Amino acid sequence: MRRIRVRAARLLLRGIAAVALALAVTLSATPTPAKASDSNGSYWVFVDILISAYEKGSDGRYTPAEINELIQQVIGAVNGAKTDVLARLDSETTNELRAKAEAALTKAELLRVPWLAGPAINSMHDAAYSAKAHLATVRDSDAALNDVGKAMIVLFTELNAAYLMVDADEGTNLAQAQRPYFRQGLEYLIREMTPDCSYGGVPNAGMISYGCSYDGRSVRAVYWAGTNTYSIDDGPPISGQIRETVVQDFLMADTARVLAQQALDVLLRNGVPLP
């Protein structure tokens, strides 16, 4: 993948600095997807930012004001998630990635200063692709895969916005070129984070159970033929037979898997191919 070269004393984005002085920092009003846990609280905004980036460019171009707003959104989101991202990478297997992620997230503020953005974007590029590659390293650890997956989503979303800033100024196509690799990483993460599930119960007595587990957590759904309903962990009845995806989503609601699925859906809706 192409990286950004530092160009001394040259603005990466004409007009952005002037617009930044005139605009208040505003966050996207794009609705956050439904979620069942606060564990992903500081991460859902990155899905919103992906959506916002596509909406801003829906007419085929980005104005300086739109790019400035997008960069402000990213900086705010990064500042909100940085502490949690780095805390999750504090292990022997993720130390190298942690150092790269810390550099990339800290340098997000440099996107406010166009002539300093080049080295910051290089750092973001290295960290995002390191996180993607690290998924395979930690694939046998549910907890580590979840943590690295969240970091990858944050870092690629940050990189996407930074590349859009460059593309708007230089007429390049860097953001579009890196999205297929983001899609590839998301699909790999979703596959590897599939929970272990199995059926049980006493079918002859009209009772079927379906249990799933992941990272030491488990849920169990029970279906009763007499009422044609099922419940998850003794929750309210749900009409019909057990839907496996509903049970799995219930278990994985606070993990990187649900974030990855939402981000992947955004990319697929906008025609992003695999590399």
Image (spheres, helix red, strand yellow):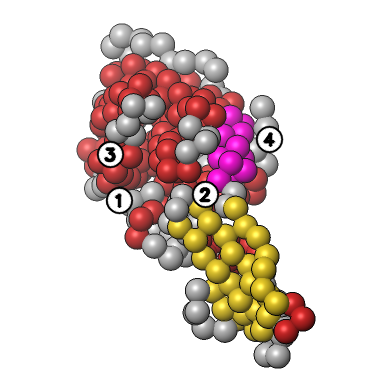
The amino acid beneath tag 2 is Arg
Q: Is residue 35 left or right of residue 98?
A: right
- Residue 273 is marked as 4
Which image quarter holds the C terminus? top right
Q: In the rendering, at what x and y percent does residue 74 appear? A: 35, 41
Dot 4 alpha-carbon crowd within 10 angstroms: few under 14, some 14 to 19, many 20 or more: some
Residue 186 part of the magenta segment? yes
Residue 85: horizontal and vertical position, in percent? 33, 39
The residue closer to the viewer here, 83 or 222, is 222
Q: Which mark is residue 87?
A: 3
Q: Which residue is mark 1?
A: 26
Residue at the image position 52 percent from the left and 15 percent from the top: 2
Amino acid at pointer 4: Pro
Numbered circle sitting on residue 13: none
Between discs 4 and 1, the one toward the N terminus? 1
Dot 2 corresponds to which residue?
257
* Vertical comparison of 49 with 71: above or below: below
